[in-house]
Image (spheres, rainbow, N blue to C red):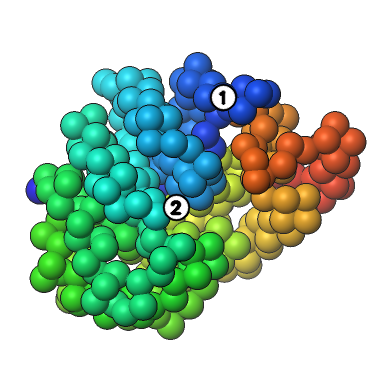
Amino acid sequence: MTRLKLTGLVAATHTPFHDDGSLNLDIVAKQAEHLQRNGINTAFIGGSTGESHSLNVDERRQLTTRWMEVTHGSDMKVVVHVGSNCLVDAAALAKHAQQSKACAVAALSPSYFKPRSVEVLVDCAAQVASAAPDTPFYFYDIPVLTGVSLPMPEFLELGRKAIPNLAGLKFTNPDLMAFQFCLRAGDGSFDVPWGCDEFLLAAVALGATGAVGSTYNFAAPIYHRVLKAFAAGDLATAREEQFRAVQMIQIIVRYGFIGSTKAIMKMLGVDVGPGRLPNPKMSAEATKSLHADLEKIGFFGWI
């Protein structure tokens, strides 16, 4: 297995739908072009932002196939999220992602019947990862959505023995103390891309070299400036840019994350459609109000 390190910004992409909720895979090419124009060369598809739990297995395969078709022959890499409450489905999706030549697969924890120990979580991850043995595997830690909050440094230490293709973690967890231990697990051999956009600067200061995030789809210029300023030792500018991101995220959350981020994509010319229930569609009135609030803070000038 080729070792992998996700560096810079990785966009956790939306799954595009028609207004009736069916897949709109024709939009994927426009999504990929938009990302590359904004300096992003890796897409993390079918994750939380991609509403994976609202897709059936066949739709998830179709989504992977389309992204791989669109990015074939380009510099863009694709990480496929395959996690599911059904480990058999997750393993099937991992196998398909490997056959499709994805650069990596990732999976979050089952969240209905929850693993109660790190040992059980490792067993779950191993079952999925073993279906794609030649592809780097990332465990996707996002306790705020799964309700599974287990020590990730311990997961890495046990996982390195049980999961030969374990590349690391997508760490969507604000626990910066645990993050530091994860960066040093296995003598620093694991890749631990950061997953909380609102704390990117803090994570970079502690050693993060890559980050996977939803808002990188439409606000990448802000975060590129965070990284550039930090690398130059200009902390004042880095903090100012990070605060711009925080102001933007505060507004987005107020309107509902999936609906509002998809609305912003449409504002920028990439119509990924509405969310799929249980994520509600945004009304025209709410969308207009969202635009006005973003305009008020200067968002459209920032990007």
What x and y, as percent, mark residue 187? 17, 76
The amino acid sitting under disc 2 is Val
Whole-Å distance between the Cαs marked 2 and 1? 26 Å
Q: Is residue 228 left or right of residue 159?
A: right
| Mark identifier at residue 162 | none
Element type at marker 1?
A: loop
What x and y, as percent, mark residue 10? 43, 46
Q: Quadrant of the C terminus?
A: top right
80, above or below 121, in the image: above
| Mark identifier at residue 212 | 2
Which residue corresponds to the image point at 44% horizontal and 41% vertical from the top-left?
Answer: 46
Which residue corresponds to the image point at 85% horizontal and 32% vertical from the top-left?
Answer: 284
Which of the 4 image quadrants contains residue 148?
Answer: bottom left
| Mark identifier at residue 22 | 1
In primary-sequence order, the first of circles 2 and 1 is: 1
Which of the 4 image quadrants contains residue 282?
Answer: top right
Which of the 4 image quadrants contains residue 109?
Answer: bottom left
